[in-house]
Amino acid sequence: MRAMVVFASKHGSTAEVATALGEALREEGVEVEVADAALAKLPEDVDAVLLGSAIYMGSWLNSAVDFAIGNSEALRRLPVWLFSVGPLGEAPDDEEEQPRQLATLRDTLEPNDHVLFDGRLDPSLLGFAERIMIKAVRAPKGDFRRWDLIRAWGRKVAYELRASLPR
Ligand SMILES: Cc1cc2nc3c(=O)[nH]c(=O)nc-3n(C[C@H](O)[C@H](O)[C@H](O)COP(=O)(O)O)c2cc1C
């Protein structure tokens, strides 16, 4: 069983989530490659793809969206799981579903699941414009990633993947 975890991350926290997901899958006996969406090439013999992105201003990062669009034909034929990293310890306001691209991603890739993980906001990593934006929305600072939840979801994906493959 071979899976690929593809991620888009601006300040590293989603990259670390992708790595933790890869480790959880490996512990369940899945061979895993973790790759940045901007560089990732989908191998022919991969059995499943986990694709995820950090959320900025309600959206996935472009490299993850581009990967989804650029590989949509292959991804439609594979079991796919989506993950997003964003909210900072508070429920996202439910006026609008996040990420904004989720409905299109669901239509295009028909994923088995989409999960939203809490993220990390470290002001020392942010650029000037980003600091102004987070000040304006009073976003809480800190690392809200729940590694137990992240790893549990990775294990769940491994079980579902095993169940979906012909014996
Ligand atoms: C300028 C800015 C805008 C953000 N906008 C959103 C948002 O719209 N929704 C959300 O859930 N999280 C938002 N976040 C939180 C990030 O998604 C979170 O910090 C995430 O862990 C960043 O991932 P990265 O380190 O992989 O880039 C925002 C963060 C910043 C700095």
Image (cartoon, helix red, strand yellow):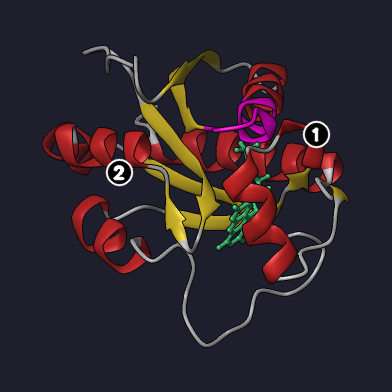
Q: Residue at left 63%, top 42%?
A: 128
Q: Specify whether residue 68 is in view.
A: yes
Q: Is residue 10 magenta?
A: yes
Q: Are marks 2 and 1 in contact (CB under 8 Å)?
A: no
The prevailing secondary structure element of the residues shown in magenta is helix
Residue nearest the viewer, comparing 140 with 80: 140
Q: Residue at left 34%, top 16%?
A: 40
Quadrant in which the C terminus is drawn: top left
Residue nearest the viewer, comparing 6 with 112: 6
Q: Earlier in the sequence, mark 2 or mark 1?
A: 2
The kind of secondary structure element at disc 1 is: helix
Query: Would you name the residue on which mark 1 appears?
Result: 124
Question: x and y percent of residue 99 in the render?
Answer: 45, 62
Query: Looking at the image, which residue sits at the far bottom?
Result: 95
Mark 2: few/some/many CA within 10 Å (<14, 14-19, 20+) = many
Q: Over which residues does the magenta segment extend?
A: 9-18
Q: Amino acid at mark 1?
A: Ser
Q: Specify whether residue 87 is in view.
A: no
Q: Is residue 57 above or below residue 130?
A: below
Query: Would you name the residue on which mark 2 appears?
Result: 65
Measured Cα–Cα span from mark 2 to mark 1: 27 Å
Question: x and y percent of residue 64 in the render?
Answer: 36, 38
Question: x and y percent of residue 66 in the render?
Answer: 24, 37
Residue nearest the viewer, comparing 95 with 147: 95
Q: Residue at left 65%, top 27%?
A: 12
> Which of the 4 image quarters holds residue 88?
bottom right
Q: Nearer the viewer, mark 2 or mark 1?
A: 1
Q: Is residue 111 magenta?
A: no
